[in-house]
Amino acid sequence: MKKFEDTYQHKGLRRQLVNLLREKGITDENVLSAINNIPRHYFLDSAFDKIAYEDRAFPIGEGQTISQPYTVAYQSQLLQVKPYDKILEIGTGSVYQASVLAEMGAKVFTIERQKKLYDHNKNFCLKTKYHNIKFFYGDGFLGLPTYAPFDKVIITAAAPFIPPRLIEQLKVGGLMVIPVDVGPFQQMLRLTKLADGSYAEERFDNFSFVPMLEGKNGG
Ligand code: SAH
Protein backbone atom coordinates (compact mmCIF):
# COMPACT_ATOMS: atom_id res chain seq x y z
CA MET A 1 0.00 0.00 0.00
CA LYS A 2 1.44 3.35 -1.05
CA LYS A 3 2.03 5.93 1.67
CA PHE A 4 1.15 9.50 0.74
CA GLU A 5 3.67 11.78 2.36
CA ASP A 6 4.88 15.08 1.00
CA THR A 7 8.22 15.72 2.71
CA TYR A 8 10.51 18.77 2.66
CA GLN A 9 12.72 16.81 0.29
CA HIS A 10 9.84 16.33 -2.18
CA LYS A 11 8.95 20.03 -1.89
CA GLY A 12 12.58 21.02 -2.54
CA LEU A 13 12.77 18.79 -5.63
CA ARG A 14 9.53 20.31 -6.85
CA ARG A 15 10.92 23.85 -6.54
CA GLN A 16 13.94 22.75 -8.60
CA LEU A 17 11.62 21.29 -11.24
CA VAL A 18 9.70 24.57 -11.39
CA ASN A 19 12.96 26.49 -11.86
CA LEU A 20 13.92 24.12 -14.68
CA LEU A 21 10.53 24.66 -16.38
CA ARG A 22 11.07 28.41 -16.10
CA GLU A 23 14.51 28.03 -17.75
CA LYS A 24 12.90 25.97 -20.53
CA GLY A 25 10.57 28.88 -21.28
CA ILE A 26 7.39 28.35 -19.25
CA THR A 27 6.21 31.81 -18.13
CA ASP A 28 2.60 31.32 -16.95
CA GLU A 29 2.91 31.79 -13.17
CA ASN A 30 -0.40 30.01 -12.55
CA VAL A 31 0.92 26.91 -14.31
CA LEU A 32 4.22 27.07 -12.41
CA SER A 33 2.52 27.46 -9.05
CA ALA A 34 0.12 24.57 -9.80
CA ILE A 35 3.12 22.32 -10.53
CA ASN A 36 4.81 23.59 -7.40
CA ASN A 37 1.72 22.70 -5.34
CA ILE A 38 1.02 19.19 -6.66
CA PRO A 39 2.92 16.20 -5.25
CA ARG A 40 3.71 14.44 -8.57
CA HIS A 41 5.16 11.47 -6.69
CA TYR A 42 1.61 10.62 -5.52
CA PHE A 43 0.74 9.80 -9.16
CA LEU A 44 3.53 7.27 -9.59
CA ASP A 45 4.39 3.88 -8.21
CA SER A 46 6.48 4.23 -5.03
CA ALA A 47 9.45 2.76 -6.94
CA PHE A 48 9.67 6.13 -8.73
CA ASP A 49 9.51 8.21 -5.55
CA LYS A 50 13.08 9.51 -5.75
CA ILE A 51 12.92 10.39 -9.46
CA ALA A 52 9.35 11.70 -9.67
CA TYR A 53 10.62 15.27 -10.06
CA GLU A 54 12.92 14.61 -12.98
CA ASP A 55 11.59 16.18 -16.16
CA ARG A 56 10.66 12.82 -17.69
CA ALA A 57 7.65 10.76 -18.62
CA PHE A 58 7.11 7.52 -16.64
CA PRO A 59 5.12 4.33 -17.23
CA ILE A 60 1.81 4.09 -15.32
CA GLY A 61 0.64 0.64 -16.49
CA GLU A 62 -1.44 -0.55 -19.46
CA GLY A 63 1.39 0.64 -21.73
CA GLN A 64 0.54 4.26 -20.87
CA THR A 65 2.57 7.12 -19.44
CA ILE A 66 2.35 10.14 -17.17
CA SER A 67 3.45 12.99 -19.45
CA GLN A 68 6.74 14.80 -18.90
CA PRO A 69 6.27 17.86 -16.62
CA TYR A 70 7.53 20.17 -19.40
CA THR A 71 4.85 18.82 -21.75
CA VAL A 72 2.15 19.24 -19.10
CA ALA A 73 3.33 22.80 -18.42
CA TYR A 74 3.55 23.60 -22.15
CA GLN A 75 0.03 22.38 -22.94
CA SER A 76 -1.41 24.04 -19.83
CA GLN A 77 0.23 27.35 -20.77
CA LEU A 78 -1.16 27.22 -24.34
CA LEU A 79 -4.62 26.58 -22.90
CA GLN A 80 -4.65 29.98 -21.06
CA VAL A 81 -6.56 28.47 -18.14
CA LYS A 82 -8.85 30.74 -16.13
CA PRO A 83 -10.74 29.87 -12.94
CA TYR A 84 -14.10 28.21 -13.72
CA ASP A 85 -13.09 27.35 -17.30
CA LYS A 86 -14.95 24.21 -18.36
CA ILE A 87 -12.24 21.97 -19.82
CA LEU A 88 -12.51 18.63 -21.63
CA GLU A 89 -9.40 16.45 -21.39
CA ILE A 90 -8.83 13.41 -23.61
CA GLY A 91 -6.55 10.81 -21.97
CA THR A 92 -6.87 10.84 -18.15
CA GLY A 93 -3.85 8.54 -17.70
CA SER A 94 -2.40 9.24 -14.26
CA VAL A 95 -4.72 12.27 -13.60
CA TYR A 96 -1.65 14.53 -13.24
CA GLN A 97 -2.53 16.88 -16.14
CA ALA A 98 -6.16 17.02 -14.97
CA SER A 99 -4.93 17.92 -11.47
CA VAL A 100 -2.81 20.79 -12.80
CA LEU A 101 -5.91 22.20 -14.52
CA ALA A 102 -8.05 21.63 -11.42
CA GLU A 103 -5.44 23.29 -9.20
CA MET A 104 -5.73 26.33 -11.52
CA GLY A 105 -9.45 26.45 -10.73
CA ALA A 106 -10.88 24.84 -13.88
CA LYS A 107 -13.80 22.38 -13.97
CA VAL A 108 -12.27 19.34 -15.65
CA PHE A 109 -14.12 16.60 -17.57
CA THR A 110 -11.62 13.88 -18.38
CA ILE A 111 -12.07 10.79 -20.58
CA GLU A 112 -10.00 7.59 -20.54
CA ARG A 113 -10.42 4.69 -23.00
CA GLN A 114 -8.57 2.09 -20.87
CA LYS A 115 -11.01 0.54 -18.40
CA LYS A 116 -8.25 -0.50 -15.97
CA LEU A 117 -6.89 3.02 -15.73
CA TYR A 118 -10.39 4.45 -15.36
CA ASP A 119 -11.17 1.97 -12.55
CA HIS A 120 -7.84 2.73 -10.87
CA ASN A 121 -8.67 6.44 -10.97
CA LYS A 122 -11.85 5.86 -8.96
CA ASN A 123 -9.52 5.76 -5.94
CA PHE A 124 -7.54 8.78 -7.09
CA CYS A 125 -5.58 9.96 -4.05
CA LEU A 126 -6.47 13.67 -4.33
CA LYS A 127 -10.15 13.06 -5.13
CA THR A 128 -11.44 15.09 -2.20
CA LYS A 129 -9.14 18.01 -2.92
CA TYR A 130 -9.92 18.04 -6.66
CA HIS A 131 -13.67 17.50 -6.55
CA ASN A 132 -13.70 19.69 -9.70
CA ILE A 133 -12.48 16.72 -11.80
CA LYS A 134 -15.15 14.44 -13.28
CA PHE A 135 -14.04 11.05 -14.66
CA PHE A 136 -15.48 9.31 -17.73
CA TYR A 137 -14.78 5.98 -19.41
CA GLY A 138 -15.14 6.24 -23.17
CA ASP A 139 -13.71 7.11 -26.55
CA GLY A 140 -12.28 10.61 -26.58
CA PHE A 141 -12.89 10.95 -30.33
CA LEU A 142 -16.58 11.24 -29.42
CA GLY A 143 -16.10 13.76 -26.60
CA LEU A 144 -18.91 14.35 -24.12
CA PRO A 145 -21.86 15.82 -26.05
CA THR A 146 -24.04 15.85 -22.91
CA TYR A 147 -21.70 18.25 -21.14
CA ALA A 148 -20.77 20.40 -24.17
CA PRO A 149 -19.96 23.13 -24.99
CA PHE A 150 -16.50 23.50 -23.41
CA ASP A 151 -14.32 26.61 -23.05
CA LYS A 152 -11.21 24.56 -23.73
CA VAL A 153 -10.26 21.07 -24.99
CA ILE A 154 -6.88 19.42 -24.32
CA ILE A 155 -5.76 16.19 -25.97
CA THR A 156 -2.93 14.36 -24.21
CA ALA A 157 -2.35 11.58 -26.77
CA ALA A 158 -1.05 11.75 -30.37
CA ALA A 159 -4.10 12.55 -32.51
CA PRO A 160 -3.97 11.15 -36.08
CA PHE A 161 -6.28 14.02 -37.18
CA ILE A 162 -8.35 16.79 -35.58
CA PRO A 163 -11.49 15.04 -34.25
CA PRO A 164 -14.51 16.89 -35.76
CA ARG A 165 -16.78 16.06 -32.79
CA LEU A 166 -14.40 17.83 -30.44
CA ILE A 167 -14.45 20.98 -32.60
CA GLU A 168 -18.26 20.83 -32.46
CA GLN A 169 -18.17 20.64 -28.66
CA LEU A 170 -15.96 23.74 -28.32
CA LYS A 171 -17.49 27.16 -27.63
CA VAL A 172 -17.00 29.91 -30.21
CA GLY A 173 -13.78 31.64 -29.14
CA GLY A 174 -12.74 28.50 -27.24
CA LEU A 175 -9.29 26.90 -27.53
CA MET A 176 -8.15 23.36 -28.31
CA VAL A 177 -4.57 22.23 -27.65
CA ILE A 178 -3.77 19.08 -29.61
CA PRO A 179 -0.61 17.21 -30.67
CA VAL A 180 -1.27 16.01 -34.23
CA ASP A 181 0.43 13.44 -36.45
CA VAL A 182 0.97 9.72 -36.73
CA GLY A 183 4.79 9.71 -36.96
CA PRO A 184 7.17 9.47 -33.96
CA PHE A 185 6.67 13.20 -33.31
CA GLN A 186 3.61 15.37 -33.21
CA GLN A 187 3.33 19.08 -33.67
CA MET A 188 1.46 20.94 -30.93
CA LEU A 189 -1.40 22.92 -32.39
CA ARG A 190 -3.67 25.48 -30.79
CA LEU A 191 -7.01 25.92 -32.52
CA THR A 192 -9.42 28.78 -31.89
CA LYS A 193 -13.03 28.09 -32.80
CA LEU A 194 -14.55 30.71 -35.08
CA ALA A 195 -18.17 31.89 -35.29
CA ASP A 196 -18.79 29.99 -38.56
CA GLY A 197 -17.86 26.67 -36.89
CA SER A 198 -14.39 26.47 -38.48
CA TYR A 199 -11.14 27.18 -36.63
CA ALA A 200 -7.91 29.17 -36.83
CA GLU A 201 -4.68 27.24 -36.30
CA GLU A 202 -1.39 28.17 -34.57
CA ARG A 203 1.60 25.81 -34.72
CA PHE A 204 4.11 25.20 -31.91
CA ASP A 205 6.89 22.73 -31.01
CA ASN A 206 7.14 18.98 -31.61
CA PHE A 207 6.48 16.40 -28.88
CA SER A 208 6.15 12.64 -28.65
CA PHE A 209 2.93 11.17 -27.21
CA VAL A 210 1.41 7.70 -26.95
CA PRO A 211 -1.22 7.25 -29.70
CA MET A 212 -4.84 8.40 -29.45
CA LEU A 213 -6.76 5.23 -30.33
CA GLU A 214 -10.35 4.79 -31.43
CA GLY A 215 -12.89 2.90 -29.32
CA LYS A 216 -12.79 1.74 -25.71
CA ASN A 217 -10.54 -0.96 -24.29
CA GLY A 218 -11.76 -3.22 -21.48
CA GLY A 219 -15.55 -3.60 -21.73
N1 SAH B 1 -2.98 13.22 -19.27
C1 SAH B 1 -2.25 12.05 -18.87
C2 SAH B 1 -1.36 11.53 -19.99
C3 SAH B 1 -1.71 10.13 -20.28
S1 SAH B 1 -1.01 9.36 -21.69
C4 SAH B 1 -1.47 12.27 -17.59
O1 SAH B 1 -1.41 13.40 -17.11
O2 SAH B 1 -0.94 11.31 -17.03
C5 SAH B 1 -2.42 9.34 -22.79
C6 SAH B 1 -3.66 8.64 -22.31
O3 SAH B 1 -4.64 8.77 -23.35
C7 SAH B 1 -3.52 7.14 -22.07
O4 SAH B 1 -3.95 6.83 -20.78
C8 SAH B 1 -4.41 6.50 -23.14
O5 SAH B 1 -5.05 5.31 -22.72
C9 SAH B 1 -5.43 7.61 -23.37
N2 SAH B 1 -6.14 7.56 -24.65
C10 SAH B 1 -5.66 7.24 -25.89
N3 SAH B 1 -6.63 7.32 -26.82
C11 SAH B 1 -7.77 7.74 -26.17
C12 SAH B 1 -9.12 8.00 -26.57
N4 SAH B 1 -9.53 7.86 -27.84
N5 SAH B 1 -9.99 8.39 -25.62
C13 SAH B 1 -9.62 8.53 -24.33
N6 SAH B 1 -8.37 8.29 -23.88
C14 SAH B 1 -7.45 7.89 -24.79
Image (spheres, helix red, strand yellow):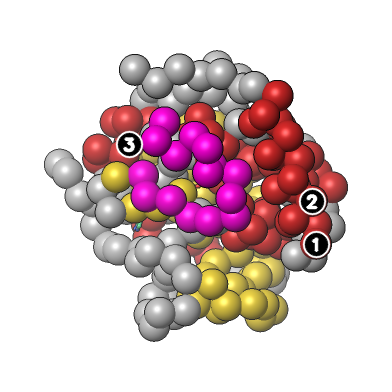
Q: Residue 204 appears at what percent x and percent y?
A: 67, 77
The reply to whether the magenta stretch includes residue 47 is yes
Mark 2: which amino acid? Asn
Q: Which mark is residue 118?
A: 3
The kind of secondary structure element at disc 2 is helix
Left/right of residue 95 with respect to residue 215 in the rendered view: right
The kind of secondary structure element at disc 3 is helix
Span shown in magenta: 46-60
User: How far apart, in angstroms, are the residues tagged by discs 1 and 3?
Assistant: 34 Å
Q: Residue 173 appears at what percent x and percent y?
A: 73, 62
Query: Given contact means CB atoms under 8 Å apart, are the residues at marks 1 and 3 in contact?
Result: no
Q: Residue 147 appears at what percent x and percent y?
A: 50, 41
Query: Which quarter of the rendered picture does the C terminus lie within?
Result: top left
Would you identify the image quadrant in which residue 47 lies? top left
- Name the one closer to the observer, 137 or 104: 104
The reply to whether the magenta stretch includes residue 155 is no
Query: Given contact means CB atoms under 8 Å apart, are the residues at marks 2 and 1 in contact?
Result: yes
Q: Residue at x 29, y 45 (%)?
A: 61
Which residue carries the number 2 mark? Answer: 19
Query: Which quarter of the rendered picture does the N terminus lie within?
Result: top left
Quick one: label 2, few (<14), some, or many (20+) residues within 10 Å? some
Q: From what the image shows, is residue 102 above or below residue 207?
A: above
Which residue carries the number 1 mark? Answer: 23
